[in-house]
Amino acid sequence: MKTSGKGKAFLAEEGEMEHNPEKAAFRMWLRVFVTIRWITILGILAATLVASRLFHIGFPTTAAYAVCVFVTLCNLALLYQARRLRKMPTSQAIHQARVWGTVHLLLDLLAFIVLLHFTGGIENPFVFYFVLHIIGASVILHYRVVYMLATAKIVAVMLLVGLEYAWGKYGWGIPHINLVGFASPTLYQQESYILVVLIVLGSALFAATYMATSVAGELRKSQRAVVSLSQRLLKKRTGELEQASVEIAKLEEEKNRFLRFLGIAAHDLKAPLTAIQGFLWIMLGGYSGDITDKQRNMLERSTFRIKELMNLISDLLDIPRIETGQIVEEMKQVSLGQVIRASIGDLRETAKQKKLKLELELPPALPKIYGSAPRLQQVITNLVSNAINYTPEGSITIRVKAGDDEIQVEVVDTGIGVPAEDLPRLFEDFFRAGNVETKGTGLGLSISRRIVEAHGGRIWVESPCPETGKGSRFAFTLPRKIENKRR
Amino acid sequence: MPHKILVVDDDPDILEAISMILESQGYKVATARDGVEGLANLKAEKPDLLVLDLMMPKMDGFAVCKELQDPRWAKYKDMPILILTSVREEASRRRYELETGLELDVDDYVEKPVSPDTLLERVGRLIKRKGSG
């Protein structure tokens, strides 16, 4: 028997084409059809052998075997056809399955009538097996076709029985073959028996057709509903996604345009300021002749204001540089210890002037990290100089803690702290805390946040510092390993 | 004999300011407004030091550095170059190293605006280095 092997092959290949439950059901049905036919052929062979050898019922066995051969050939053809269905698109496959199904059911009908004729006609109780056949057909065919098939079946049986009856009664028609030793040779002439068998067979056929087609119809309807629902959902989802990605691309472009604009504007602002600053320094340095103390004072204040503007511009320039990912290009293996020492180098003097203690607590073995040294230096310088600015007396501690996945850098001071209501907004652009005189650009912490985030870390503040109960603690983390995005 | 310095910058005010500072210390100063003029003046003036801006029209500072690596300019191989630019160091360092294949020495780079003291200190250091090397 090849059937089971083929069946497995069908199952394994099911995923090849687009999945449609209706098509899958049709193919499943064809497989079942083929299998039932093999079983039927075996059944006929077995019944023929048993009837002729065991019960010694007399009938032309050759005809029965011939029918078996015919059905076998039909089944092989169907097997081949079912394999071809796999490669077809759903709608064509369903149509094709119906056509082939109808043809094979008609072939079966023909084989059945021929077999019935050679195995006693109305005498053969296997005539009721016809009902099973119609149930199979109901699953695949349109219900009208099934009713027509059922009608064709009962008509064909009536014709056969009628013609055999006529042959016995009037001498024309189809000769009757008696199942010798099983049924009375005159049974086929017994009108009441014929009538009852035909009525039972006919009503059973139509009742089975009605039940099977309604169940199959419901099943198909729900299969179609599932398919159309899933397609509708898929279409809706795809549409939403497409729209969202268009919006995102637009926003991204808008942002990049703005960043480019910011970069160029900041750079062009810097050029004239540089020239002004140059001349101011020349005058201050006495390169252009002597100046009065009053003039000196005003010139010094001017350079101070220019310096402020320069800081703002270089902060504004930093933002597009960081946001457009230039920071990633600057990244390499760096020593955090070196970065920290370089950051506080110039600040030691400032701290000393304010009589503040500047303490460094580094673990003995500090691993190298992947990052941009000048940018990290910028973060630490920013945090430490803030701490110095806002600490009237006491100390500033820079502490590094190495964890398993990340390294944490803390800057703890004993200063004025940050008011609770300002804490959530402290890392926003241009935000300045309420308790300080406006000194900086208001961009230092927001740039630090961008730099830390570009490294894959987090930055936060606690005020007062939870350990000392005063001042504030700024901390940020750096992951020990950063995915190299360009890989 | 006083040392001669060629200053190349597209901003005339910067040229004037730098010239004033350098001349006050007795240096002889020649100027140029872009890279092309700078290379022409280099041949004419044969300076001891080149002060070079990076962002300039026609031929920028990167291109000038690259051009000077050519064997035709072998005479100027030992002439120190001081890069004086408003571009942040880490941003231009990368590009400089990519374009010229040379490593940028810390002494060779000053970010604008530069104070007279810093400028004179750097110039003095570079000229001394040339003299000793």
Image (cartoon, rainbow, N blue to C red):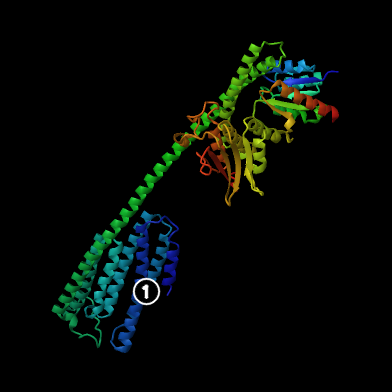
Residue A449 sits above or below residue B121 on the image: below
Residue A4 in picture, x, y percent from top left? 42, 71
Asked which quadrant contains residue A312, the reply is top right
Query: Is residue A279 visible in this depiction of the protein?
Result: yes
Residue A56 sits above or below residue A240 on the image: below
Residue A350 in picture, x, y percent from top left? 64, 30
- SS label for mark 1: helix
Asked which quadrant contains residue A246, the reply is top left
- Residue at 64% across, 20% down: A274
Crowd rating for badge 1 (residues with CA inside 10 Å; few <14, some 14–19, many 20+):
many
Residue B79 sits above or below residue B29 on the image: below
Chain ID, mark 1: A
Q: Residue furthest left?
A: A192
Q: Can you say which quadrant of the picture contains the N terminus of chain A? A: bottom left
Residue A119 sits above or below residue B93 on the image: below
Given residues A204 and B80, the one toward you in this image is B80
| Left or right relative to A35: residue A401 | right
Given residues A469 and A147, the one toward you in this image is A469
- Numbered marks: total: 1
Residue A107 in picture, x, y percent from top left? 32, 68
- Residue at 21% across, 64% down: A210
Asked which quadrant contains residue A184, the reply is bottom left
Residue ID for mark 1: A38
Residue A2 in picture, x, y percent from top left? 43, 73
> What amino acid is at disc 1?
Trp
| Left or right relative to A203: residue A311 | right
| Left or right relative to A184: residue A408 | right
| Left or right relative to A220: residue A411 | right
Query: Is residue B12 visible in this depiction of the protein?
Result: no
Given residues A38 and B80, the one toward you in this image is B80
